[in-house]
Image: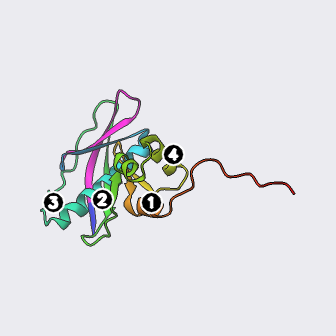
Amino acid sequence: MRYLYEAVLTPNELGGFDVEFPDLDIVTLGDDVEDAANMAADLLQNWIIAALQRNQELPNPVMGRRAPKNGYVFVVVVDCEEDAPEVETMTAEEAAEVLDVSRSRIYAMVRDGILHATKVGNSVLIDTESVKKRFNEPQAVGRPKKTALV
């Protein structure tokens, strides 16, 4: 089913953009307008799926808000179902504890494609299955051994 809500986008002091869904009282942000719009769509979809799974009644969307100074008002439309598969995630701190590495190493593993992650707002959520896979397939520590020349 399709759902649509107005989002209010305003510049923030960090040079990015804050996005608020006034009808739902939820907020996210992005580095630029495109990133903020994508983050808003992800947040809205996740929020609606969670609300549907809790049998929570969704508020009626209010349309026609005025854009704030230097900001925008736009409609975010998402397709989502109550029975959408839920991906189990953990924080970078939790993943670091499980794998016995630093949090910065977790972020490097995400960057290198070793672990899968999703950015939600300011948070990076690590896919639990990729952490389990890495844990169950430990890597040798140290430098690779040199082969002797014959």
In the rendering, which numbered label is found on residue 45? 2
Camera-side residue of 2 and 55 = 55
Circle 3: residue type:
Leu
Real-space Cα separation, disc 3 to disc 4, in angstroms? 38 Å
What residue do we see at 44% from left, 60% from top?
Answer: 135
Is 37 left, or right, of 56 in this rendering? right
**Sequence order check, earlier mark of 3 and 2:** 2
Real-space Cα separation, disc 3 to disc 1, in angstroms? 40 Å
Real-space Cα separation, disc 1 to disc 4, in angstroms? 16 Å
Q: Which residue is mark 3?
A: 58
Q: Position of residue 104 (x, y in %)?
A: 46, 41
Circle 2: residue type:
Gln
Membership of 72 in magenta stretch: no
Q: Residues within 10 Å of mark 1 (few under 14, many from 20)?
A: some
Residue extending furthest top? 13
Q: Nearer the viewer, mark 2 or mark 1?
A: 1
Please tell me whether residue 9 is drawn above or below residue 98 in the rendered image: above
Real-space Cα separation, disc 2 to disc 1, in angstroms? 30 Å
Circle 4: residue type:
Ala
What residue do we see at 29% from left, 58% from top?
Answer: 46
Q: Which residue is mark 4?
A: 108
Q: Which residue is mark 1?
A: 135
